[in-house]
Amino acid sequence: MGIVSLFRVDKKSPSYQRELYRLHYKRIYNSCLRIIGDTMEAEEAMHDAFLKIFDHIDDLHDEKAFFSWSQRIAVRTSIDKIRKKRIIFEQIDEQTAYEEENEEEVTFSAEIIKKELNLLPDGYRMVLSMRLFENYDFEEIAQMLHIKESTVRSQYIRGRDKLARNVKAAVNSNYS
């Protein structure tokens, strides 16, 4: 049962909601997990996102837009959950925000990258996840997080660099 046929039924029925959940819970959960970094909190955010989706499903009139619409709800729910923990974003001047280091590219296992990404501070992890996995541009991220675009860029650059250093250190310690 795809999303197209789901839009032809009563959107408030429990069977409709169960099927919608079954079809999309993994994708929504993974988006929440990438932003939040904690499995229990990501699961809670996923459930909160589905509650919002079910509450506002009548607002969605184009079934083709469901994927991106539900994804935005999941991302914003995750951001709100982290915001409650009061993330502190580091304000950096414009010049520093655009500095990038030229480092050699190395291929690492996804498992090590995922582990090290989850160990990053919330601000870095959230910006990296939104940029790399959710494909939001810097301006969109700034709007969603209510911070300056230069702050988003600096969080991205510093987070990316910290992630790269941590992954290299993890790889080196595994081979030592």
Image: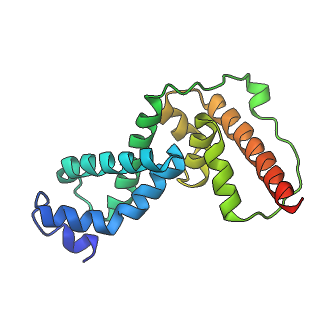
Q: Which residue is drawn at 56% across and 41% down?
A: 126
Quadrant where the C terminus sits is bottom right
Left or right: residue 156 compared with residue 130: right
Q: Which residue is drawn at 14% across and 60% down?
A: 11
- Nearest the camera: 28 or 2? 28
Q: Residue at x 21, y 64 (%)?
A: 18
Residue 55 image offset from top left, x and y in percent: 19, 47
Q: Can residue 170 be seen in this view?
A: yes
Residue 92 image offset from top left, x and y in percent: 71, 23
Quadrant for residue 45, please give it. Answer: top left
Q: How is this picture coloured?
A: rainbow
Residue that sits furthest to the bottom in the current view: 1
Q: Is residue 59 visible?
A: no
Q: Which residue is drawn at 35% across and 54% down?
A: 70
- Above or below: residue 5 compared with residue 155: below
- Above or below: residue 26 compared with residue 44: below
Quadrant for residue 80, please give it. Answer: top left
- Nearest the camera: 18 or 91? 18
Left or right: residue 168 compared with residue 86: right
Residue 135 image offset from top left, x and y in percent: 55, 53
- Marks counted in the figure total 0
Quadrant where the N terminus sits is bottom left
Residue that sits furthest to the front in the current view: 176
Left or right: residue 41 compared with residue 135: left
Residue 167 image offset from top left, x and y in percent: 77, 52
